[in-house]
Structures are given as C-alpha cells and as structure tokens.
Image: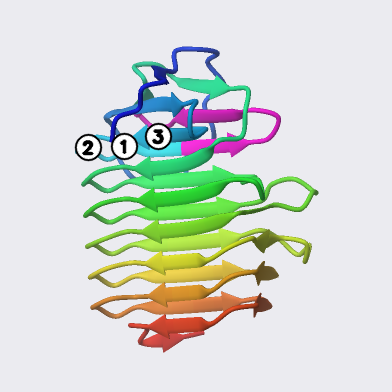
C-alpha cells in the first residue's frame, strides 16, 4: 500500500529493554516507518529471529533486544501514539508491547515460527487498546495479555487471537473488559487457553480450536 507521507524513523535512540527470552538467539534488523497520514507505525521484521519491544506513553519507543537492530540501530522513538502494525515475517520472533494506549489499534502478525506476543501493563494507570488483532501463523506460539488487576483495562473494539497450526498457549491474566467481540482460534494442534482472570465481553464470544481450557 503506498504511503506518500511515510518517513523512516532515525530519531532519538532509546535504551534497550530487558530481554524477553534470554535463552533464545535473536538477530536481524527491523524497519520502522511512521505514516503520518494515517498515524500508523509500521514495524516490519525480516526472516531472522527478531525481538521487538514497544513502549507507549508520552511517546512511542521501539527497541530491539538480544541482537536485533531497529533501523540499523538500537531503537527509535516518536512523539505520538500511533496505531501499531507489526509484521515480523518468518522466524522465531518475540514481540512485547508495554502500556498500549486505549486510543491505539494493535495488529500483530508474526508469520511462521515459534513466536511469542505479549501485551502488558507495567505502570499503575489503566491501559488497553482500541482494538487488538494477533495472528501467529504456524509454529508453537504463545500469546500473553497481562494488564494487571485494575478493571479499567479494556479493549475498545474487538479482541482477535489466531495462533494457526502448532501447539500454542494463550493466556489472558487478570481483569479485562472487551467492548466489542472476543474471537480466539487455536487452529490445528494441541492448544491451551488459560483464562486467569475475569473477562467481560459486550459482544459475542467465539472460542475454537482449543484442546485444554484452564
């Protein structure tokens, strides 16, 4: 899709975040482009095992860990809260998004590989997103949503998780309110869904492809 106002982010470099999975060997380069027309941040990985950390707040920071570079360096930041579109490509990738903002939509597609996707709240304020769509394709994948015990945490639209073929583990910790619909598909394989909290859904709930429900 053409992005006429896109510009590569080579701005402020932020400190590298704590490693997500220190036993996994990560590498590669991730390209980050901010489309100012749609206020969307495109985060695109390569065929290697990428480790990506995103922190939202007064600005949005993208850092690499464990051998992954961002636009050839340690990381970039922008003074805004754009929608997030993350496509890591094939490889054993790890994506962690801290403090997503209720004004943001979050789309993650990790391609084939043994991938992990984490959305979490580290601070004391409420968090959430305007909509979340996570696809991990083929591989033994894990998806964790952990917004803590504050019940103000919410997804303003739909929450969709599709882990494709493989032995996958989906965990939603603590309290979460979904304003739209909840769609979870474990796909083929021996999949586990761990609902470790109170989830309320205004719309419809559709859970399929799950062999073990905890």
Say which residue label 2 marks: 48
- Give me the residue at 44% from left, 58% from top: 133
Q: CA distance from mark 1 to mark 2?
A: 7 Å
Secondary structure beneath dot 1 equals loop
Q: Find out whether the residues at labels 1 and 2 contact each other: C-beta distance under 8 Å.
A: yes
Of badges 1 and 2, the one in the foreground is 2
Secondary structure beneath dot 2 equals loop
In primary-sequence order, the first of circles 2 and 3 is 3
Residue 53 x, y percent position in the rendering: 49, 37
How many other residues sit within 10 Å of disc 2, few (<14), some (14-19) or many (≥20)? some
Say which residue label 1 marks: 26
How many other residues sit within 10 Å of disc 3, few (<14), some (14-19) or many (≥20)? many
In primary-sequence order, the first of circles 1 and 2 is 1
- Give me the residue at 21% from left, 46% from top: 90
Is residue 133 rendered to the left or right of residue 127? left
Could you say which quadrant of the image residue 58 lies in?
Answer: top right
Q: Quadrant of the N terminus?
A: top left
Tell me the magenta residue range. Answer: 53-68
Task: Count the marks.
Answer: 3
How many other residues sit within 10 Å of disc 1, few (<14), some (14-19) or many (≥20)? many
In primary-sequence order, the first of circles 3 and 1 is 1
Q: CA distance from mark 2 to mark 3?
A: 18 Å
Residue 40 x, y percent position in the rendering: 48, 35
- Give me the residue at 50% from left, 53% from top: 118
């Amino acid at each position: 899709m053409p992005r006429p106002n896109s510009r590569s982010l080579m701005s402020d470099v932020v400190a590298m975040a704590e490693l997500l999975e220190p036993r996994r060997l990560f590498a590669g380069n991730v390209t980050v482009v901010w489309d100012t027309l749609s206020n969307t941040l495109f985060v695109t990985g390569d065929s290697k095992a990428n480790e990506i950390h995103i922190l939202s707040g007064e600005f949005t920071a993208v850092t690499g860990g464990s051998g992954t570079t961002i636009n050839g360096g340690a990381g970039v930041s922008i003074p805004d809260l754009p929608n997030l579109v993350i496509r890591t490509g094939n490889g054993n990738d790890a994506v962690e998004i801290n403090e997503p903002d209720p004004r943001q939509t979050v789309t993650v597609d990790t391609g084939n590989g043994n991938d992990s996707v984490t959305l979490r709240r580290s601070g004391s304020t409420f968090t959430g997103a305007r909509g979340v769509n996570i696809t991990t394709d083929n591989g033994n994948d894990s998806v964790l949503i952990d917004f803590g015990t504050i019940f103000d945490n919410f997804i303003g639209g739909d929450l969709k998780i599709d882990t494709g073929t493989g032995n996958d583990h989906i965990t939603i910790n603590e309290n979460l309110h979904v304003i739209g619909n909840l769609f979870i598909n474990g796909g083929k394989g021996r999949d586990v869904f761990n609902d470790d909290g109170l989830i309320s859904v205004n719309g419809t709930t559709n859970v399929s492809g799950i062999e073990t429900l905890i």
